[in-house]
Image: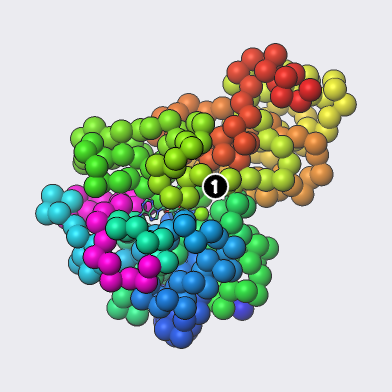
Amino acid sequence: MLVKCDPLRPDPDVVKRAAEVLRRGGVVAAPTETVYGLFAHAYSEAGCRKVFQVKRRPMDNPLIVHVDSVEMAESVAYIPPELRDILRRVWPGPITVVVKSRGVLPRCVTAGLDTVAVRAPAHPIPLAIIRELGVPIAGPSANRAGRPSPTTAEHVLEDLGDEVDLIVDGGPTFFGVESTIVDVTRTPPILLRPGPFTVEELEKFFGRIEVPPVARGLAEADVALAPGMKYRHYAPETPLVIVHFDLEEAVRLLEARGLRVAVLCVGKCPKAKHTIPLGGDLYEAAKNLYDALRRLDKLGVDIGVVPAVEERGIGLAIMNRLRKASGHREARRPEDLAAIVK
Ligand code: AMP
Ligand code: MG
């Protein structure tokens, strides 16, 4: 069931209906400022289990607990006083912190860990739903596990269809990539997933942040730093290659081998039969990225190419998602491309 909802002034009837579904142990898909989430009442074991079931998500990959305030976060987690001050300044926003859990939520929410990931989303719809319920909602992105995250209600429908009790359509999401996740139980804090809240900004609040190679999307660690990191993510069906040299040359090389090529491009697109413009700057590219990956699969081409972007600001999040989506296929020189498609 899909209902439209004004993202800025959520219709109180829609909010009440969503809260009712959640109270009964159902699941609701709704937009946040990052991507669409698939939410359950955080205290409902049945609801939280249903999130895993509907997504086909492995049970060892925990959910994010969404709250409306630092006070609500403290009802499920231990928040040290210095962190409390920081969260009051950065929330609501696209930043998730991993903190010590109070152990009050169903085990499946945290996959049995003694830590919990919490965030206050900067979006009127989930905030209104949380306020209506008076308790947190738990959820991951509302895509089928392994698929690109949904940035529109249509993406949610495409992946999960009528297995979701209610889809609240609040239009396309603002940032288009998932929240930044930082584990603040460690010193220095460690970046688990780059997102719209950049490392440069994080360091203004937390001091030095450790950025491990896995957070850049490089080589999957055998032992995942964070649960969920070891799974294939965001992947289109069509092979995708990140190109560090001239895109036009990459297209020529591939077409010369008789391959049908689609180009995802930032800024000016090179001449090619199939182009998927991501936008003029990196914020637009982040916003359009997952829709572009979904469109790539619908073109029926043999391969997609996408330019590498600078790993600064939101570019770090884009490269992390591209590396996962491409299965770590990166061509630094034309010779690499030849080796990849041989
Ligand atoms: P999603 O937003 O769909 O990517 O799912 C939430 C992500 O939050 C998961 O992939 C986990 O990696 C991360 N997460 C949730 N809880 C924890 C935790 N306690 N420790 C580390 N990471 C977590
Ligand atoms: Mg996800």
| Residue at (30, 78) in percent of width and height | 134
| Residue at (30, 52) in percent of width and height | 98
Q: Position of residue 3 (x, y in %)?
A: 57, 76
- Given residues 261 and 27, the one toward you in this image is 27
Q: Position of residue 207 (x, y in %)?
A: 20, 35
Q: How is the image coloured?
A: rainbow
Q: Please give left or right for residue 240 compared with residue 142 in the image.
A: right
Instruction: Report the label total.
Output: 1
Which residue appears farthest toward the left when viewing the image?
Answer: 81
Answer above or below: position of 265 versus 288: above
Q: Position of residue 131 (x, y in %)?
A: 32, 76
**Quarter where residue 311 is shown:** top left
Q: Circle 1 is placed at which residue position?
A: 231
| Residue at (47, 76) in percent of width and height | 47
Numbered range of the magenta stretch? 84-107
The quarter of the image holding the N terminus is bottom right
One can see residue 13 in this view: no
**Quarter where residue 157 is shown:** bottom right
- Given residues 313 and 60, the one toward you in this image is 60
Q: Position of residue 211 (x, y in %)?
A: 35, 33
**Label 1: element kind:** loop
Look at the image and say whether residue 97 sits in the magenta stretch.
Answer: yes
Q: Please give left or right for residue 134 compared with residue 30 in the image.
A: left
Q: Is the shortest distance between ligand 1 and the CB of mark 1 under 8 Å?
A: yes
Look at the image and say whether residue 286 sits in the magenta stretch.
Answer: no
Give the amino acid type for the residue marked by disc 1 in the picture.
Answer: Tyr
The quarter of the image holding the C terminus is top right
Dot 1, crowdedness within 10 Å: few (<14), some or many (≥20)?
some
Answer above or below: position of 35 versus 106: above
